[in-house]
Amino acid sequence: MPTAQEKRELLFNVHSPIELPTKEFEDDWWPLISNAWSCYSGPKPTPVGAPLGYIRNYTCRLATKFNPKPKDTSNDTPDTKRRKRTVRVAHECPAAIKITHVTATGITTVECTHSDTPAVHTHSLADVDKVKRPAAIKAMIDKETLKSNNPLETIASIRQIAEESGLGEAAAFVTRAELVNTRRRQRHTELVPLVGDVHVDDEVRAAMEFLATRDYQCKSFGRNAAATLSGIVPLLNANDGGPCTSSNSSSRSSSSINNTNINNGITDLAQGLVFGRSQQLTKLATHGWLTLIGSVKDTNQHGWKLFTLYVRDRLGCWDSGAHFFVNDTSSSPVTQALKLVRLLAPSWQPRYILTDRSPEITTAIETTFPKTAQDAQQEEHQKCEVIFSTAHTIQIWKRNITDPQVRYRMIQALHCRTRLGFEYMVEKAVSDCNNLATKQYIKDNCVGAERWGLFARQKSPFLLQAASLSVLDAYHREVERLPSVIFGLIGASRAVAEVDDNRMELSLKAPTASYKDETPLIDNIASTLLTHIQHFPYTIQMLLVEEVHAMNTRIAKGKRPPGLREPRCGCDFFNTYLLPCRHVLHTALFEDLRSAKEPAFLDDADWMFLQNKFTAKKEGLDIYRTRFSVTGNGREITEKTAEQAGKAEIDKLKMEELFESSQRLYQGLADRGDLKGLEAFVTDFEAFSTSRGSN
């Protein structure tokens, strides 16, 4: 049995006729030498009297009778701007063969075109391999490029397989450009089913079938949904007074049907597709107390916008709760989509929904979650409130408020913790502004300050932790990398499914992750402190380790301990996460300098209490839904109930507002030089403090 290289030599320099079975020739022989011959005629039937079959004539691929025309030098284009072309050297190669396929016997004969002249080439087989690769090598390239290896590894693998098959010489000229072109061709073939159909209704059905195979629950609305409903037209006829017999009444009935369809949004209105997995819908119903909603465009050729509902579970991992496509971004289709999401997740009742400053989404949310009289009276059943992303608010202000000083004042007002401080900074911004249009813009935006001001989010640390849509924007950027504008809805749906799979894998790994394996991050952390940190959830571990490193930086800079008297602090970290911050840790590190009569500042019992908040009741990070108070009482740290905690925080914010108001009043008297007013103010304040202190 000849080897692969011997077969190539026999079919390259044909000296005598070669007879082979047709199937063996097409499968085992011809793919080895297909690059050496070029067909110039055929298939032609065999001559009269010969066995029935067909003939093909081939010449050498490198046989050129003349050189190409020289490049055009008539214009003044410099050589550096001309296209680089390689001129093939002319070969007077007389080699030519004839291949005869006999249908009756199933035999293929390879022989010289001219029986008196052997098919001998004027060049070697390697010269042909440099120009074109045989079909056998192309098949190896197609198979290996499907693997996720880099080009160098792929070329090495192809050459190794070719060497084992006896085609090492043919595979020696494989280049990276061939791998790239092959992968592009394969990618184009893969994308053909994802490009979509001209009929959107058929494509919606195909997308729903695909999503069903990936364990998604789907619902649609619009023309596609109306086409599948039964009994719509009879119902409309019944509303018009029953069946009509006359032509006039028939026309009136038809007109009434069309008007009713238009009013009810059945024909020629927005379409949408809502989908979500069972696990994601369960997360949305369980942890959707705060839901993030955002959209992304340019994911399909129809211009349908993708909306995603994003929630955070008890371990702090963000995951999508549901998705929906709509072809119109007005409030009506978004409202229909949100209502379908509530059908898929009936127990989903969000308290807050964080979104960008989109009036359409705001209107859709308020329509989907209306407020009733019972909701106004009961705190636990309040209506869903819309809050705006901090990052989107600042971006809009950068476009609409051109004065840097005014814009800086508004950003300061955005981050105020009290309403009085917010109102004071807004007044300063208006007084510093000389543009009437900008002043009016600031006044119009301050009407809904409860939606974007951080002073209104102090009731829940969760609202401070998720002040922007950054995590949802990162999810959408990952989705945008997979589909493109040439895709249909099924291609965009597949991209969403792939990203959901990746996020699910990350959420499954998060509960088992620990800093025990992250050695570079814990080099400068004491072992006793590290032992306490490792009992928290992984996301809390990351936060605490960052604070420990910040504490080490404070010590390296020579800063003194803050001197706190209890494990509470007024910094943003403690206000957001209610965990020991760098200031609390710095104070606890130097607790040996405190008086022996004073209780321990932060001991093992305190750490255990903080750990049990996340693990004992299986609440996880859901404890941040309502702010609670942590007070020091000897060696105990007690947690107040939700009502007591809410009242305590409200009282604290009121006191801060009173302090700010008093400071502004004092500063105003000092700026005006009103000495009598200052003296009276200080006297009244001292008298009030003395009288309350004596009681």
Image (cartoon, grey):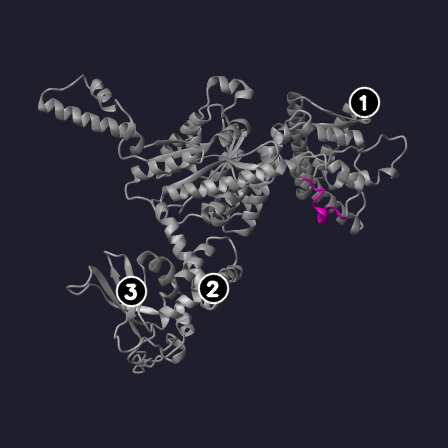
Q: CA distance from mark 2 to mark 1?
A: 103 Å
Asked whether residue 453 appears in the rendered view, the answer is no
What is the x, y in percent for residue 484?
40, 49
Callout 3, which amino acid? Thr
Looking at the rendered structure, the kind of residue marked 2 is Gly
Gap in angstroms between the C-alphas marked 2 and 3: 24 Å
Is residue 209 rendered to the left or right of residue 111? right
Labelled disc at residue 166: 2
The nearer-to-camera label among 2 and 3 is 3
- Between 412 and 343, the residue placed more toward the observer is 343
Q: Secondary structure at mark 3?
A: strand
Question: Residue 636 at x, y = what percent?
Answer: 79, 26
> Pointer 1: residues within 10 angstroms few (<14), some, or many (20+)?
few
Q: Secondary structure at mark 2?
A: loop
- Residue, disc 3: 109
Which residue is disc 1 drawn over?
694
Q: Is residue 112 above or below residue 156?
A: below
| Quadrant housing residue 628 | top right
Pick the quarter of the image with the C terminus: top right
- Name the image quarter holding the N terminus: bottom left
Does the stretch in magenta take in 479?
A: no
Residue closest to the eye, 68 or 338:
68
Q: What amino acid does circle 1 point to? A: Ser
- Which image quadrant is residue 30 in? bottom left
Q: Is residue 524 left or right of residue 658?
A: right
Mark 1 or mark 3: name the one nearer the start of the chain: 3
Determine the residue positioned at 49% across, 23% down: 347
Q: As displayed, is residue 384 above or below residue 561?
A: above
